[in-house]
Image (tube, helix red, strand yellow):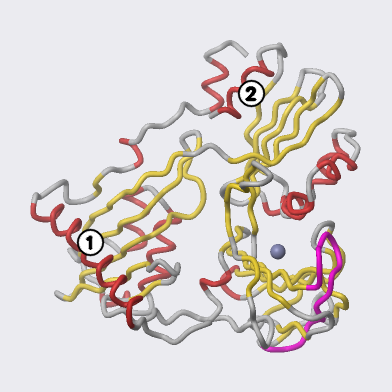
């Protein structure tokens, strides 16, 4: 909230300034964006090393806010980086300033219960008004059920967290439980604390797993979309995992795909990006030597380069990033590290979690709460959309 107050405070002094909520041109880098407004790109050097690496991801941004004076001068912009953080670029008396700040959002847990009229995908879009939820649901259940056998009247239950920012859903919904009851059989998928999905028996969902990017994978820094740094006193993010590796260790393609980038990126140093099926993209940073070339098709396990210390890095390691539809996701979700099923204490925790969720779902069913959607987006506390907000104030 604090950051919106900043936004408002500055804008009150600037009459005839316009707020725009627009689409970022795909592939445009933050440096190119600065150039457009004649801002010195050295402003990036005022950030610390990790934040500079984050800035280089801005080309994947979807929509962003801009406040522009009537003479075309940029007063302020808020550009999302991933789902949790944003670059805040603003003009002061002594020139432009740049900082990385958290995105203010609200997160709510929703439970959607609906029956099938046409198809699960269609009905979720139509009744819950959330296309990404429909995509996630289909992705999770397509391995355990043949959707062609689904009939009118079959039942869908989804428990999920959805972030909202200024009245718009932010990011991919985080499904906790998905259930499709078809032919009298309830097919469940549960998310476990390891971030992976399992069926009701604790068996791992059969997904198209990726391979490891290094033969011996030792993770030194995990993936986070947002964590509070206790020493620096600021929010940080790490859009990938760091893996320990001696300089010159072969880097392996995590899956079949096409090399779409092989070169230098500020922050990430020598980088290779591979485009895979289903809109997945992997990124391998800080290399000492690049082997794969742009346009080349690689197979899972092929050597694409060698680990190093290039870019903003404190020592030789591999930074491995995974993106789905341009958004960073935790590579641990798709890279196969362990066995297929949960065992021991892990399994116990999973079953406890499962009991908790099925109890909630059963309660809603028993008490006969509205049969299609419970707690939809419309019932939520939502901030007014920026456009109307500013218009009402005569700007
Ligand atoms: Zn890293």
Q: Nearer the viewer, residue 50 or 152?
A: 50
Magenta portion: prevailing SS class: loop
Element type where label 1 sits in the image:
helix
Vertical side of 191 occupied by 226: above or below: above
Q: Residue at x 70, y 82 (%)?
A: 253
Mark 1 residue crowding within 10 angstroms, few (<14) / some (14–19) / many (20+): few
Element type where label 2 sits in the image:
helix
Q: Residue at x 39, y 72 (%)?
A: 197
The disc label shown at residue 6, or none: 2
Residue 236 image point, x, y percent: 64, 49
Quadrant of picture, ligand 1: bottom right
Q: Residue at x 42, y 82 (%)?
A: 206
Q: Residue at x 77, y 87 (%)?
A: 303
Would you identify the image quadrant in which residue 203 lies? bottom left
Residue 157 falls inside the magenta stretch = no
| CA distance separating discs 1 and 2 | 41 Å
Residue 184 image point, x, y percent: 14, 74
The answer to whether 237 appears left or right of 380 in the picture is right
Q: Earlier in the sequence, mark 1 or mark 2?
A: 2
The disc label shown at residue 97, or none: none
The answer to whether 235 appears left or right of 58 in the picture is left
Label 1, ligand 1: CB separation under 8 Å: no
Vertical side of 93 occupied by 59: above or below: below
Residue 302 falls inside the magenta stretch = yes
Mark 2 residue crowding within 10 angstroms, few (<14) / some (14–19) / many (20+): few
Vertical side of 146 occupied by 261: above or below: above
What segment carries the magenta color? 301-316
- The residue identified by callout 1 is 356
Would you identify the image quadrant in which residue 305 lies? bottom right
Label 2, ligand 1: CB separation under 8 Å: no
Residue 244 image point, x, y percent: 71, 76
Residue 191 image point, x, y percent: 37, 67
């Amino acid at each position: 909230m604090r950051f919106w107050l900043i936004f408002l405070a500055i804008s009150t002094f600037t009459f005839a300034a316009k707020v725009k909520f627009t689409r970022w041109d795909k592939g445009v880098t933050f440096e190119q964006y600065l150039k457009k407004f004649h801002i010195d790109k050295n402003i990036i050097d005022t950030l610390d090393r990790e934040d500079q690496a984050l800035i280089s991801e801005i080309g994947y941004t979807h929509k962003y806010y801009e406040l522009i004076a009537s003479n075309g001068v940029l007063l302020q912009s808020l550009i999302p980086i991933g789902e949790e953080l944003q670059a805040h670029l603003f003009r002061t008396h002594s020139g432009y300033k740049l900082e990385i700040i958290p995105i203010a959002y609200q997160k709510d847990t929703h439970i959607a219960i609906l029956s099938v009229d046409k198809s699960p995908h269609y009905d979720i879009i139509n009744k819950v008004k959330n296309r990404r939820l429909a995509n996630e649901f289909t992705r999770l259940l397509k391995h355990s059920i043949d959707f062609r056998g689904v009939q009118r009247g079959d039942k869908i239950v989804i428990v999920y967290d959805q972030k909202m920012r200024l009245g718009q859903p932010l990011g991919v919904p985080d499904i906790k439980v998905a259930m499709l009851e078809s032919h009298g059989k309830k097919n469940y998928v549960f998310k476990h604390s390891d971030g992976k999905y399992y069926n009701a028996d604790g068996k791992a969902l059969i997904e198209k797993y990726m391979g490891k990017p290094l033969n011996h994978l030792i993770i030194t820094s995990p993936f986070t979309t947002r964590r509070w740094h206790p020493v620096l006193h600021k929010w940080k993010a790490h859009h990938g995992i760091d893996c320990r590796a001696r300089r010159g260790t072969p880097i392996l393609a995590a899956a079949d795909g096409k090399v779409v980038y092989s070169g230098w990126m500020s922050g990430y140093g020598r980088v290779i990006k591979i485009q895979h099926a289903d809109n997945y993209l992997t990124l391998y940073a800080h290399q000492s030597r690049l082997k794969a070339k742009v346009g080349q098709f690689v197979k899972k396990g092929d050597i694409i380069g060698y680990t190093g210390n290039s870019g903003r890095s404190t020592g030789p390691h591999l930074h491995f990033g995974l993106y789905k539809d341009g958004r960073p996701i935790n590579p641990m979700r798709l890279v196969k590290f362990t066995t297929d099923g949960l065992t021991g204490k892990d399994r116990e925790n999973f079953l406890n979690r499962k009991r908790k969720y099925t109890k909630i779902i059963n309660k809603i069913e028993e008490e006969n709460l509205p049969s299609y959607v419970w707690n939809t987006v419309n019932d939520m506390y939502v901030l007014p959309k920026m456009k109307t907000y500013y218009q009402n104030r005569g700007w």
